[in-house]
């Protein structure tokens, strides 16, 4: 799998952003290898990318092809309760990509990721890096809203993740920000907690991956804003290297 490098931008974090949110970290396991040696920011480690298996034999070369392959997806049980399939939004050649967990109620209604209250916080984080939403790409591991916003189940993640990997390979971002435990565990194949993994930088499918807290958790726990500030400093450094 091809590897890519990093690019440029500028950073400064925004202040208090009220609202409520909630995020859990259930103990559940992914198939595949566990992350062996987390890297320091200066010495990222390589993460096996064989998990990039796709649902068809033909490798897509555009986001439109991936969306067309998804179709009116009925591959897992989540299709039964969704209003809209939430594919992703943003620049198709973005240098910076954010990956979250799954759509919520507002996202399910509007068909766009991160449009609710946590999405407003994410928009401010993006702006704090000197970019706008249409200059980055935003997607989730899961494309359909779980009932009552419950945690995604393992079979749902395994069914949906190949399409996320295809998005990553088509966009070829320089930096990937994994938002929250599910995104981090899916991308890094790690059972370690987000608290242990954040603050580090990982080589990932040719990009640099920065784990950080999900905006909903950040809104619930404003005392962790300093941690996100530090993570965004790493993003700035990676984009400007």
Image (cartoon, rainbow, N blue to C red):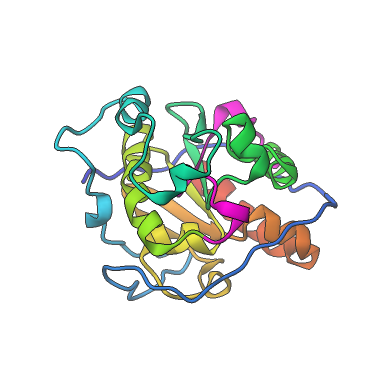
**Which residue sits furthest front?**
80
Relative to 118, 213 lies left or right: left
Residue 30, above or below 112: below
User: Could you tell me which residue is drawn at 45 percent across and 54 percent down?
Assistant: 209
* Residue shown at 80% from the left, 56% from the top: 20
Q: Nearer the viewer, residue 159 or 161?
A: 159
Foreground pick, 136 / 8: 136
Q: Is residue 146 left or right of residue 4?
A: right
Residue 160 against residue 213 in the figure, above or below: above
Q: How many marks?
A: 0
**Res. 223 visible in picture:** yes
| In this picture, residue 6 sits left or right of residue 196 | left
Residue 141 inside the magenta-drawn segment: yes
Position in image of residue 141 (x %, y %): 45, 49
Range of magenta residues: 128-151
Dividing the picture into quadrants, the one containing residue 188 is: bottom left
Depth check, front residue: 16 or 56: 56
Whole-percent x, y for residue 58 in the image: 16, 32
**Residue 195 sits above or below residue 230 on the image:** below
- Left or right of residue 32: residue 152: right
Q: Is residue 212 magenta?
A: no
Q: Position of residue 106 (x, y in %)?
A: 67, 39
Please give the name of the residue rendered at 53% of the width and 33% of the height, measured from the top-left corner. Answer: 84
Q: Residue at x 50, y 56 (%)?
A: 210
Residue 28 in the image, given as x and y percentages of width and height: 43, 73
Q: Is any atom of residue 175 visible in this view?
A: no
């Amino acid at each position: 799998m091809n590897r890519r490098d990093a690019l440029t931008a500028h950073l400064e974090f925004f202040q208090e952003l009220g609202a409520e949110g909630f995020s859990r970290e259930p103990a559940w396991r992914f198939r595949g290898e566990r992350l062996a040696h987390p890297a320091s920011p200066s010495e990222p480690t390589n993460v096996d990318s064989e998990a990039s298996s796709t649902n068809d034999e033909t490798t897509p070369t555009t986001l439109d092809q991936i969306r067309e392959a998804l179709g009116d997806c009925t591959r897992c049980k989540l299709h039964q309760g969704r209003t809209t399939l939430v594919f992703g939004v943003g620049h198709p050649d973005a240098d910076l990509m954010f990956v979250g967990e799954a759509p919520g109620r507002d996202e399910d209604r509007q068909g766009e990721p991160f449009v609710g209250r946590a999405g407003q916080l994410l928009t401010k984080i993006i702006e704090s890096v000197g970019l706008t939403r249409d200059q980055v790409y935003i997607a989730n591991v899961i494309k359909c809203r779980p009932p009552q916003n419950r945690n995604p189940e393992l079979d749902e993640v395994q069914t949906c993740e190949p399409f996320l990997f295809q998005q990553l390979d088509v966009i070829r971002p320089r930096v990937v920000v994994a938002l929250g435990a599910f995104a981090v565990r899916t991308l890094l194949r790690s059972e370690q907690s987000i608290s242990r993994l954040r603050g580090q930088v990982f080589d990932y499918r040719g990009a640099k991956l920065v784990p950080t807290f999900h905006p909903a958790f950040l809104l619930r726990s404003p005392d962790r804003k300093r941690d996100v500030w530090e993570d965004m400093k790493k993003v700035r450094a990676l984009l400007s290297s």
